[in-house]
Amino acid sequence: MPSELKQSYRLGVDIGGTFTDIVLLSESGEIHTKKLLSSPPDYSEAIEVGVRDLLREVRVDCTQIREFIHGTTIVTNTIIERKGSPIALVTTRGFRDILELGRFRAPSLYDSSFRKLEPLAERRLRFEVTERVAADGSVLRPLVEEELEGIAGAIAREGIGSIAICFINAYANGANEAAAARRLRELLPGVSISTSSQLLPKIQEYERTSTTAVNAYVRPVAERYLDSLQKRLAGLGITCDLMIMQSAGGCVPGKVAAENPIYIVESGPAAGVVGAQRLSGRLGVGDIMVVDVGGTTAKASLIEDGAFTVATESEVGGSAAMGHRLIQGAGYAVQAPTIDIAEVGAGGGSIAVVDDAGGLRVGPRSAGAVPGPVCYDRGGEQPTVTDANLFLGYISPTKLVGGELKLNKAKAEKVVSDLAARLGISPVDAAYGIHLIANSNMMRALNGVSSERGRDPSGYTLFAIGGNGSVHGTKLADDLRMNTVIVPPASGVFSALGLLFADVEHQVIRTYYRRVTEIDPAELSLMLEEMVAEARRLLADGGFPEGRQDIKLVAEVRYFGQQTTLPIALPGTRITQEELEKCSTDFAEAHRLNYGYDSPHEKVQIVSLKVLGRGLADTPRVPERLVSQRSSDAAVERRPVYFGPEHGWMDTPVLPRAALTAEPRPGPMIIEEYESTSVVRPGWSAAVDAFSNIVMRRIV
Amino acid sequence: MPAAATMKADPVKRELIKNALVTIADNMIALVIRTSRSIVVKNNLDFSASILNAKGEMVAQGLSLPGHLGATEPALRGCLEHFGEDIRPGDILCNNDPYSGASHLNDVFMFRPVFVEEKLIGFLSIIIHHTDMGGRVPGGNAPDSTEIYQEGLRIPPLKIMEANKPNETLLRIIRTNVRVSDMVVGDMLSQMSSLVTAETELRRVIDDYGMETVKFYMSELIDHAERLTRQGIAALPDGTGEFTDWIDEDGVGGPPVRIQVRLTVKGDSAEIDFTGTSPQTSGAINPNRYFAVGLSLAVLRTVLDPSIPANAGFNRCVRVITPEGCFVNPRFPAPVGARGLAGFRVRHAVSGALAMLLPGRVGACVGGSEFALVLAGYPAGRKPFLTLEFHNVTGIGGGPDRDGQDGGPYGLANIANVPVEVIEAEGPVRVECYAFLPDTGGAGRYRGALGLVREYRLLEEEALIQLRSDRQVNPPYGLFGGHPGSPGKIIMNPGTPEERVAPAKFIGKMKHDEVLRAEMPGAGGYGNPLDRDPRAVAEDVRQEKISPAKARDIYGVVLREPEQALDIEATRALRAEMQRRAESAAPTGKAGQP
């Protein structure tokens, strides 16, 4: 029979550090999941295997797949493993070393062993050309094109396949860069060229050069990978477009992502936040904090009135365990918009140590996936948070990943007891201490998006995802005085599900560096019109006609001289004097909300403009209901679980998600499923809703 | 609830309360970073936030500039001496007077006392380096002031907030006396706002754990840091290291300033003795005692476990001797505004002494001339402008086992450069170049980082220029046979008939289209250059970081045209010859610089 009578399905695939997570979602909301080890160096192989096996298991035909969205760590992996394409950089005369000089910022004080990453283009492959643009965009010296001939010769001799072009002040006028790109394309046909003014015309030469260099370095790898993936999918019979998640929370066609990989650095984590935002939107919950706890890090983000915040820059290749969360310098700067996520080095693999003076510390060092916690029995010798959680009865020694991962509880108990002896406390106090200290570290990520920005966490719902998010969720909520915790279906592979809730979104960004009082409204309107036209063209190219385009305009605004901007919505492209004034008052209000005060004497400045063009899908992205097919209906068991000195060890029921109903059931209890465990502490209740979310509420 | 006196320290609770307190300090800092307008705050991280106990001892610090490590407690002491019992809920105390415990005038210290049930629990503190505090020159960094009265507005211990109301009188006095007053007062509002927010958070911690418990751990955390520090120092070998470094001149034509350091480790404590250092100068580059102490402690931290909490417990283990009237402990009314430069030299000298005590653990001197530039003007009919730039450090010195990284950041200053495009967008200046200078890194078995060049062209009719730099006579030192980095140089209008060499420090005028070229020193090398791996030398030539001539003359490495291929045989012969010549020549080298 024709396949249109069968159900259609959507596939979300997220590649994290170690695992490839696959979610298959039917039109009617059934969720099927699959978790398997990734297959470096060609990550597309595990995707092919996993997708094929999952479709076979659930008897779905490849022709029923009408959407494939992918979250990938290819940019970070390429940078960390140094597997990118060797690049050449073409810069303005006098500025050959911008990329290597960087910003002179160390991510930690006192640590004399710190070395920043080596530049992506070595000095001999950084070429200067004569040209100059002024800060106002006027061309002081046109490009001397003849100089490019010698440069092209050198690039050809070295066999370099990718070039980055970044000139001083090109954010204000990209004409000289465009001329250089044109000439180099003639001289070096087939070589990939990334141009800063075309890629992301934002002020600050080091950050823009670094962004362009990262793009040039990763682009050939990203192109090969996505091409290979598309072919493998086609081989399976999946013919829909390959879509890729961007760091800012929308997806774009694979070809666009491959040419501009800087926009997809935080693809997976962004999918988790978008998923949380869309799903909580359906529940009518507007203010949530998302906590995503994995093996090495805890990530937090804030959703307010149904919207997340987007930061204007990030870094790639650094480590959350390195230095201080508030200073940069550990990785390469990338100016692409990225969902604002605070990250700290605290997860299941975080190692507990006793310091020289008998103090207990947890993390940021992590046992990672290899050797992993002691209880994995793969050579780990130092107690980790997971070992403590096993000791306390929070996680099962036999049920992880549907029983595929067996844990050695005796070993975990031994290392925790040894640590306790060194501290002079009882083993259970040590285990609970590790759990609490890990919590207090995770809390620093949550603080980073709440109290640090003038928000009181108690007004928010905690949305717990990642393999360890729901183990720590109710305790985190207790400590932050939050009253509700939501654990969504497929919470352990939630980013893969979140991918499927995202819309297609194109971002057009320009620098517009002016004090508000000095802006010519006509000039600003013209610029916005051009940007909107560009966004509409990109959407139309992707198959979204005028009627299915949603356009939003945002100005990044600050007090003159500030470091950080706040995004302020603009009503449309026609800007009048009144609207400029409103932009200033909106900014003052946002500043008050975020920082506790505003400063009426000071000058307000626009730094950049952003147009977001969203393609509106013809069906709702989140189905009417969600049903997790992995929930087993195993019988209710009991085991002793420790909830701190105030409760002691409690004989606690252990049940699958499917055993919960809409009727709240009082804790304590442990809810076990394929990829995660939820701990419901005493004083909390748990129920499930129509979307299979576990909803935990404080009852005392 | 047991009384504090009978409480026993619990390792879990201590860590939890420490995390809670550090989070509060971090939150204060996050707010300051995000909202500050001052370039000094944004790019130089020139601020600190901390929590002190009721006795005024520092318990926990957020991210902080090393120079503030030693100054927070004395500045609070200055306030406590003045106000005595007259400190109440809702107050914020402030102080920027170096002669009341503060540091230099731009560093405004603010303290928020926190009371529970009318009992003082402790203080929250934020220090910010404000862009301007009035005085003779913009930015307050004039090296040629001769008394503190010239340097700007002194705020003795005062209440800038009382009963949660800002002290409008004081704020008006500040607003009237400082340049770019919107910026300065805006940053002060942000400083106060952060303190008020932090009080709410500290109260929450007290609610969670109880007042007596929090009070107990606000002492216990200090004791714990002291125990960790003593363990760390005890693991270092006992002994003494001595070192001398120099400042070329004091900015008012005085003689070179000698910084003499004798660092002794004995058992579980250390002593850093500045006896032998030059007397205070008549210029404004004297660092005061607290600044010198803070920086000395920071250098010592680099050889200890970086995770030891930076609180009063660390300071208890180290005695710093600064004879009164010497350069690092000047008498009233000595000016201290331009002490930043000397602060670097204090770090370099203490680091050198540490290298003598612990050979094989500490690298040669970082590069840089402590270059600081202010360009300011009030053109008729146009916006006034003020461009402020610091390029203190250019890169890392050669180490015992690896090269100093070119363009490597220095964790003991951590000052970011200002983007060229931001300078050009905000002021009438064009930066003509910003790049490495080949052949400027100190030669050695492990090479020092390259020096830098930066050129500024003035686009307005006229500007006041105030320049501070050093290291033209005494370049960044090498160690154990390594060469020093290149000296600094300032050139006006290079490549034109008006080209001339300018002094390292001056205040003057710059005219339209004039160019100032700053050549900043490279870092020192470590070990004999003839022991450097010839392949590393060849690679430096290939990257155009050193010239073939230097490769031959200093490293004894012979490269062949056209591809600059390494000639191993010729290199071996040349090195043997150079070694012979060196051995027959008389030994050279300054005291303290082996």
Image (spheres, grey):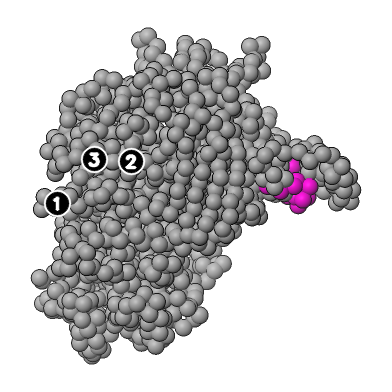
Left or right: B139 as drawn, with respect to B186: right
What type is the residue that disc 1 sits on? Lys
Q: Nearer the viewer, residue B486 or B362?
A: B362
Secondary-structure class at tag 2: helix
- Contact between marks 3 and 1 (CB within 8 A): the answer is no
Task: Give x and y (percent) for residue A35.
Answer: 41, 75
Taking the spot 28% from the left edge, 41% from the top edge, the residue there is B76
Quadrant where the C terminus of chain A sits is bottom left
In magenta segment, residue A277: no
Q: Which residue is mark 1?
A: B119
**Chain of the residue that carries numbered disc 3 in the rendered image:** B
Secondary-structure class at tag 3: helix
Mark 3 or 1, nearer chain start: 3
* In the depicted structure, whether residue A427 falls above or below residue B155: below
The stretch of residues the image draws in magenta is B526-543
Task: Give x and y (percent) for residue B442.
Answer: 68, 40
Taking the spot 37% from the left edge, 9% from the top edge, the residue there is B380
What type is the residue that disc 2 sits on? Pro
Mark 1 or 2, nearer chain start: 2
